[in-house]
Amino acid sequence: MNKLLWMIISGLVFAAAAWVMQAAGEKLDSKNLLSGQAGFMDYRSLRPGTFRKITAADLPKPFATSSSSNAPTVAARPADAWPQAPAGFKVELYATGLDMPRQIRLAPNGDFFVAESQLGEVKVFRGRNKDGKPEQVSSFA
């Protein structure tokens, strides 16, 4: 069994190497090669058979573009934006008032933990009361 597996793996490695060698040997048509600033494009400009060559010298200097100072902003949720549930299910708001929540993890017992990065705190939410709100909210870490 070990010998057969070794032969299969060797064959796959050989086939992959042959494919890479064939691809490396293909001629690249210079009219299909975009280099320098022309190599920077978005998905609308992509075409099959077009190649891009971007070197480290082509990249903008650190903090030279407006994207370096384009910090994200929080947008308010539109009033009519709400998850749609299948028939027989409903969606309710469980918790509010969180300060920049970044990560949620569910415990096997149903508790869930929310990391609030700005505060450097992890909150734990336990249970659900008759109104669908958490029975207990406390600082875990």
Image (cartoon, rainbow, N blue to C red):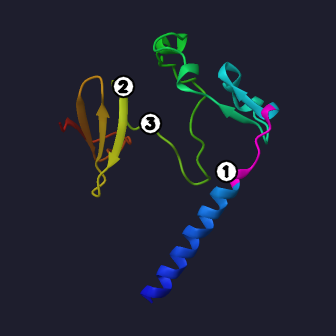
Q: Are marks 2 and 3 in contact (CB under 8 Å)?
A: no
Q: CA distance from mark 2 to mark 1?
A: 48 Å
- Return the x and y of residue 21 as percentages of the image width and height: 65, 57
Asked which secondary structure carries label 2, the reply is loop
Tell me which amino acid carries mark 2: Met
Asked which secondary structure carries label 1, the reply is helix
Bounds of the magenta segment: 23-30
Q: CA distance from mark 2 to mark 3?
A: 17 Å
Q: Which residue is mark 3?
A: 93
Q: Nearer the viewer, residue 67 or 21?
A: 21
* Residue located at (59% from left, 62% from top): 17
| Residue 99 occupies quadrant | top left
The mark nearer the N terminus, 3 or 1, is 1
> For the C terminus, which image quadrant?
top left
- Return the x and y of residue 122 as percentages of the image width and height: 24, 35
- Return the x and y of residue 6 as percentages of the image width and height: 47, 80
The mark found on residue 98 in the picture is none
The mark nearer the N terminus, 2 or 1, is 1
In-image side of 70 versus 109 (left or right): right
Tell me which amino acid carries mark 1: Ala
